[in-house]
Image (spheres, rainbow, N blue to C red):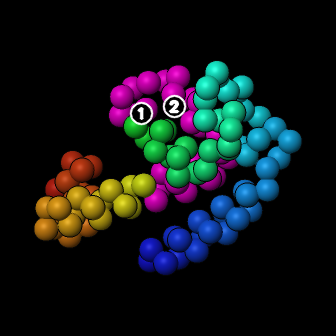
Amino acid sequence: MFDRIHKAGARLFGARSTPSPDGPGGSRPAAGKGSATAKRPHNLFEAAAVYVSAHAEDDQDRIDEAAGWVSPEALSFGVNELACRAVVALARERDESPGTVARALLGLPAV
């Protein structure tokens, strides 16, 4: 399963690697002074990490900023990959199955 996800991501990331005139995700806000965006474009995994952590912290400005770094499809893929990796890491840490951990995180009853 993860093989298919990684292959899809590689295809998606490869298609996104050619920068457009407006940046990697189309138009995006101008970078601030000393910002990393002034030096290099953000990749989909960086955007997903900032997007998810901003949601966890309820920081709408960072959510909007991260959403502008890549296409909605790329962001969706990155968030999905982050979720998969987080569930696998927690499952290993807790010595439980990924399914059990995912259900617990979502507040669903055990199967």
Query: Does the rendering let one see residue 99?
Result: no
| Secondary-structure class at tag 2 | helix
Whether residue 52 sits left or right of residue 106 in the image: it is: right
User: Residue under circle 2?
Assistant: 63
The kind of residue tagged 1 is His
Dot 1 corresponds to which residue? Answer: 55
Left or right, residue 40 beside residue 66:
right
Q: Magenta span: helix, strand or loop, mainly?
A: helix
Q: Nearer the viewer, residue 102 or 55?
A: 55
Mark-to-mark CA distance, 2 and 1: 7 Å
Determine the secondary structure under disc 1. Answer: helix
Q: Residue at x 51, y 31 (%)?
A: 63
Vertical comparison of 111 with 42: above or below: below
Residue 81 seen anywhere in this rendered image of the structure? yes
Q: Which residues are magenta?
A: 54-81
- x, y percentage for residue 4? 53, 76
Q: Are marks 2 and 1 in contact (CB under 8 Å)?
A: yes
